Image (cartoon, coloured by chain):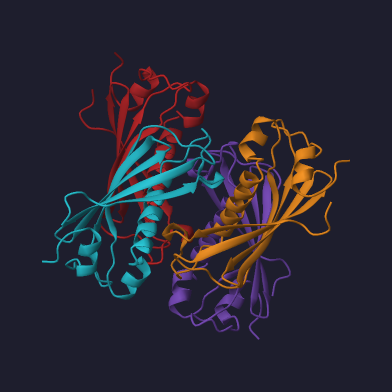
Chain colours: A orange, B purple, C red, D cyan
Amino acid sequence: MSGEPRIFEHSFFVPYADIDQMGFVYYANYLVYFEMARAALLRESELPYLEMERDGVMLPVVESHCTYRKPAHYDDELTVKTRLVGFKGPRLRIEYDVCRGGEILASGHTVHICMSPEGKVLRPSPALLELVGMPAP
Amino acid sequence: MSGEPRIFEHSFFVPYADIDQMGFVYYANYLVYFEMARAALLRESELPYLEMERDGVMLPVVESHCTYRKPAHYDDELTVKTRLVGFKGPRLRIEYDVCRGGEILASGHTVHICMSPEGKVLRPSPALLELVGMPAP
Amino acid sequence: MSGEPRIFEHSFFVPYADIDQMGFVYYANYLVYFEMARAALLRESELPYLEMERDGVMLPVVESHCTYRKPAHYDDELTVKTRLVGFKGPRLRIEYDVCRGGEILASGHTVHICMSPEGKVLRPSPALLELVGMPAP
Amino acid sequence: MSGEPRIFEHSFFVPYADIDQMGFVYYANYLVYFEMARAALLRESELPYLEMERDGVMLPVVESHCTYRKPAHYDDELTVKTRLVGFKGPRLRIEYDVCRGGEILASGHTVHICMSPEGKVLRPSPALLELVGMPAP
């Protein structure tokens, strides 16, 4: 419910596998970094995605967006700052900044939809609403 | 200066490596498919990206966007339909539909900026303008 | 029965995503190429892996090996030549050469084991034995 | 010249991107894990690979091998135990175990060759020999 969304940080070193021939992180890998940050966030929140899936709640991505400002390089230590913006109906918006030290290299967002394994759109569970700091209805 | 942007098609089969545990193509891989389609387009246009790089013209991605409608599966034959929308100053917009048969599974765009290897923003070359069907200035 | 194992060929262009900062195909991607070649082989043999999985036969990899001789580059047209060497009990050996024109860039093999989804080791089915050119027992 | 090779450990959580549709880590990703472990080892040894490249020493992979015993899953915490076995002439052998808790899920090795950027085979530098616990000649 808090006015400010919660921010989680996840840090890692860029592996060689992620670098392209310009010596930069290949652009699709930022979406992988977003996902690693989401997983770390859920893990720390004691709401692991695997358990959600077992409970019949999936959060497939329906939209992704990324703006690339400066390149990241091999072995850079990067930090993804993740903001759970909140639900609008069944749709959850999450925003990300990928940083090296104080510098933002890339920014983006993903939109997820709350679904059953059979593809039925679901209302977000109380646990999910609590996670994003929204009051249960 | 055709009113209609040119559309290129590139088809391939989804490899096992691209599938996640829901049995769907992992969301970051669509950006790889966009890039494979761009490469195929440049190859067919006899303007291969490698040669452009050798000539000192790079087209790094500054923005990516993708909307995911329906999942793609292992061994699906997918077709990426690519539209070179055109330059706005040094910025090139390209749009993509990822299709299976007549069905659009995902849509997106990338924005690229014309740059020298030293990071200087460049005017698009006549060859690039011709590629996207725009008149040379 | 046949003295010579059957050889299948699968060709493709190297995407930018697969290149590392030395300008070479990153070494783990050769295993992806092996798998794309296996999938193409099964598809052409009208024994698609998905159908096998549906029929309760899985072929997980238990061993992989690759020797790297010469680097492959962005946009190279590569051909994977795949040889189904045959079954030894439940274990299937497949060998691969990754070629550019007449030149072998990398060679390797994978070993697969015939399994049920529950992890029970299975005898190879007659369809699989026929695929590799071995007589049914 | 210690008889026992040094062992380094590197831990991480398996991202969703690495999982295939059986719910297991896709086999090529183990080679990426090997590489991340090598990078962590060099970083901790204060002999970062990037600096080596800048100094004109490259260590391209000429051979990779992996044996897969048990599958790893999404969000598993894995530890790669890396042993620098040593140089045989210009060839460096490194061995890896990928573990979950006390259990070994996969084992493998890579062989690297000491090279200049121009492709000339080099003698291992004193710093590299020291790294692997071998006496300078």
Residue A66 visible in image: no
Q: Residue C130: x and y, percent?
A: 34, 22
| Side (left or right) of D54 relative to C54 | left
Q: Residue C25: x and y, percent?
A: 38, 58
Q: Which residue appears at 48% of the width and 61% of the height?
A: A14
Q: Residue C124: x and y, percent?
A: 36, 20
Seen from this angle, which residue lies furthest bottom? B137
Between C121 and B136, which is closer to the camera in this rendering? C121
Image quadrant holding the C terminus of chain C, namely top left
Q: Is residue D7 above or below residue D132?
A: above
Q: Which residue appears at 43% of the width and 77% of the height?
A: B54
Between D21 and B7, which is closer to the camera in this rendering? D21
Q: Is residue A75 above or below residue A103?
A: above
Q: Residue D38: x and y, percent?
A: 35, 56
Image quadrant holding the N terminus of chain C, namely top left
| Side (left or right) of D137 relative to D104 | left
Q: Which residue appears at 75% of the width and 53% of the height?
A: A93
Q: Which residue appears at 41% of the width and 66% of the height?
A: C21
Seen from this angle, which residue lies furthest left? D137
Seen from this angle, which residue lies furthest front? D2
**Residue B135, image quadrant:** bottom right
Between B37 and C121, which is closer to the camera in this rendering? C121
Seen from this angle, which residue lies furthest top? C137
Residue A78 visible in image: yes
Q: What count of labels does the image hold?
A: 0
| Side (left or right) of D31 relative to D21 | left
**Residue A85, image quadrant:** bottom right
